[in-house]
Image (cartoon, rainbow, N blue to C red):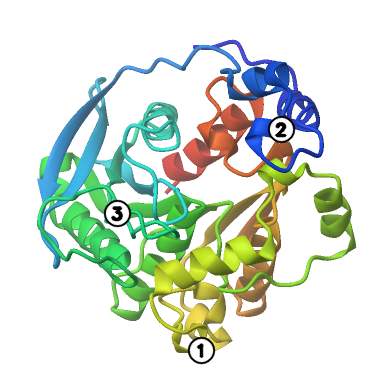
Amino acid sequence: MATPTGPLEMERRMHALGDAATWEDVDAQAHRAWDAPYGPPETWAVDAEDREIPGPHGPVPVRVYTPRASADGPRPCLVWLHGGGFVHGDLDMPEGDHVARGVAGRADAVVVSVDYRLCDGFDGSPAREFPGGPEHVTAPIPLDDVCAAATWTRSSADTLGIDPARVAIGGASAGGNLAAAASLRLTDEGTPPAASLLMYLVAHPVRPEPDAEEAQALAGTPPMVRFPLETMQAMSSNYLGRPFQEATPYDFPGLADPGQLAALPRTYIETDEYDDLRVSGRRYAEQLREAGVEVEYVVRRGVCHGHLNRVGLAEARDSMDRMGDLVRGL
C-alpha cells in the first residue's frame, strides 16, 4: 500500500494557487503541483468485472469489485456512485475506481460502482454516450439508473455472494446527491438500504447560508477551487431540466420534510473543509438529526472538494478507512 504524505498537503497546494481567476492565470509550477499525485495508488487483492444490467432507460453499466480471498459467508455490499456535477465522471476516475477498490479491500465487501447516465454540459455540450436510452438526460433519469442498480444488486445477492440485508448505498458530490435521493426513494418504496454514505454531497438546489466557521474557511479558499452561487445554480438547473420550484425531494433530498426523512437508515455524511458544498451537507445532517435519523457528520480538515479523487492523499485514505469500517460493520 502507498505511504501517505503528511497531513494538510492538499491545503498547502491549494493556497499556492493564489487568487487567480482562471487556470491560465495560475503559476505554472503551482498548477503542476496541484495536478500531481500525492503518492502511488493503493493496491488491493480485488477483482473487477464490468457488466451491464437492465434499467428503465436502457442498460446501465456497472463494475463489480470482489475481494479475491474466500469469505466465511455472504459479504456486505456498497452500491457506489462517482461524482462529476451530473455531467462528468465515469467508472475509471479515482473517485470511482480507486475508491471502490479501497472500500472493497478495507471492508472485505463487494462494491457495485454504477455508471449512471449523465446530463449534457452547462454549455450544451453533449454528454458521454451511453448504451440506449433517451437522447436528452435530466432528473430523474440518473436516479432511475441508480435505483435500478440498487434493486439489481439485492436481487443478485446469491450470484454476488452478498447479504441482501447488508447493502448500503453511497456516493460523492453529485453521486452523493443521487445516493441520498436513492435512499429516500427506496425507503419510500419499502426497500431501504442498510446505510447511506454521503461524501461532500449537494443536497439542496440552492446552497443554504454558511455559519460563521464555514464562512471563514470559504473566505480563505482560492477562487479556482470554489463553487460560486451562480455555478451551483447552473448545475442544479441543468440537472433538473425544469424550474427550481418544481424540484422534489427525489431531486434534492434537502427538500424533504421531517416525516419523510424520519424513516431513513443510519447515515454518514462527510464534507470538505474548503468546499462550498459543505454547507449543504451540514444542513442535511441537521435535518436528518432533527427527524430522528442516526447521523454521523464529519468535516474532513485540510481538503477542498473532491479529495477522494486525489490518489495517495492522506485524508482520502482516512475517508476510505471510515467508509470501510462502516461497510464492514453493516
Residue at screen point 30% across, 52% down: 127
Q: In the figure, is residue 97 to the left or right of 66? A: right
Residue at screen point 18% across, 50% down: 130
Residue type at the position of mark 2? Asp
Residue 322 in sight: yes
Q: Residues within 10 Å of mark 2 (few under 14, many from 20)?
A: few
Q: Find disc 2 in the rendering and name its residue.
A: 25
Q: Cβ–Cβ below 8 Å for labels 1 and 3?
A: no
Residue 210's spot in the image, x, y percent? 79, 65
* Nearer to us in this view, 85 or 231: 231
Residue 292's spot in the image, x, y percent? 61, 76
Q: Find disc 3 in the rendering and name its residue.
A: 126
Residue type at the position of mark 3? Pro
Residue type at the position of mark 1? Gln
Q: Residues within 10 Å of mark 3 (few under 14, many from 20)?
A: some
Alpha carbon of mark 2 to alpha carbon of mark 3: how far?
28 Å
Alpha carbon of mark 1 to alpha carbon of mark 3: how far?
26 Å
Q: Which quarter of the picture shows residue 110?
A: top left
